[in-house]
Amino acid sequence: MINIRLQKISDAKRFYEILNNPSFKYFNVQPNSIEEEIEYLKWNEKRIKDNIEYNYTILKDRDVIWAIGVKIKPNSNFIGEIWYFLDEKYWWHGITSQAVKLIEEVCIHKLNLTRLEIYMQLENKASEKVAIKNFYEKEGILKQFIKHKDSSKKDCYLYAKIVW
Ligand SMILES: CC(C)(COP(=O)(O)OP(=O)(O)OC[C@H]1O[C@@H](n2cnc3c(N)ncnc32)[C@H](O)[C@@H]1OP(=O)(O)O)[C@@H](O)C(=O)NCCC(=O)NCCS
């Protein structure tokens, strides 16, 4: 059984474990310690208050397996960027494709966003497939847009969905 809820500081240990996985080749967020992750999570309340970012946790049978969030584009209150990551144990089961629908509910009905974006490095086929399966359209390539783990800058695809 899968449930979604706002992130809690107690999620820090699991996020630290999930993110420090060498298989996360195209995701450049790797906390150096659990304390660093706690520090990040502490700011979530303020991010919501300031309408900057809404971050959620997915639980499977009460275990934290996954995170998804939406960042509101600065100086706009109608564009959101969706991001996600999932514990490798659960890859390839369609969980993220389904979970995007859950965050879209928040984006559309709670935040009144009318344009949703997903960015991914060109090589990140799993993330691209998640976007395509959720009917996002490829709008182009953004050159040197994402900072890679080794600090090099990588091109990425921009996928977007307009909510009418
Ligand atoms: C991206 C990510 C969240 C996808 O999660 P997931 O739950 O495995 O995704 P889904 O199972 O919904 O898979 C989406 C599709 O991509 C396919 N896919 C998964 N991994 C793939 C890969 N490495 N290469 C090609 N296709 C892949 C799946 O088969 C599925 O297609 P299908 O339904 O036609 O079989 C997960 O791989 C992840 O956490 N990666 C690391 C973090 C990351 O890169 N986040 C995205 C940053 S933009």
Image (cartoon, grey):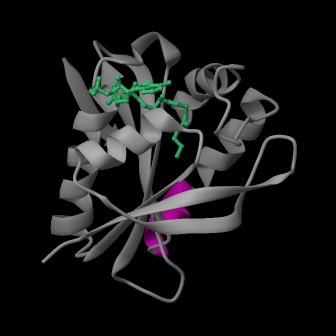
Residue 7, can we see it?
A: no
Q: Residue 128, image x and y in percent?
A: 43, 44
Which residue is at 85% across, 51% downward? 152
Please identify the quadrant where the C terminus is shown.
bottom left
Give 145 or 34, whichever is nearer the viewer. 145
Q: Is residue 124 above or below residue 154?
A: above
Which residue is at 25% across, 42% downward? 133
Please report the bounds of the magenta region as a residue range.
44-50
Residue 148, can we see it?
A: yes
Which residue is at 29% across, 58% downward? 136
Please identify the quadrant where the N terminus is shown.
top left
Q: Residue 19, image x and y in percent?
A: 64, 28
Give 153 or 95, whichever is nearer the viewer. 153
Answer with the quarter of the image where residue 137 lies: bottom left
Q: Is residue 84 above or below residue 25?
A: below
Answer with the quarter of the image where residue 159 lies: bottom left
Q: Is residue 55 left or right of residue 30?
A: left
Q: Is residue 65 above or below residue 116?
A: above
Query: Does the segment drawn in magenta span residue 157?
Result: no
Q: Is residue 113 left or right of residue 80?
A: left
Q: Residue 35, image x and y in percent?
A: 76, 33
Q: Is residue 148 left or right of residue 164?
A: right
Query: Does the segment drawn in magenta span residue 46?
Result: yes
Q: Main secondary structure of the magenta part?
A: helix
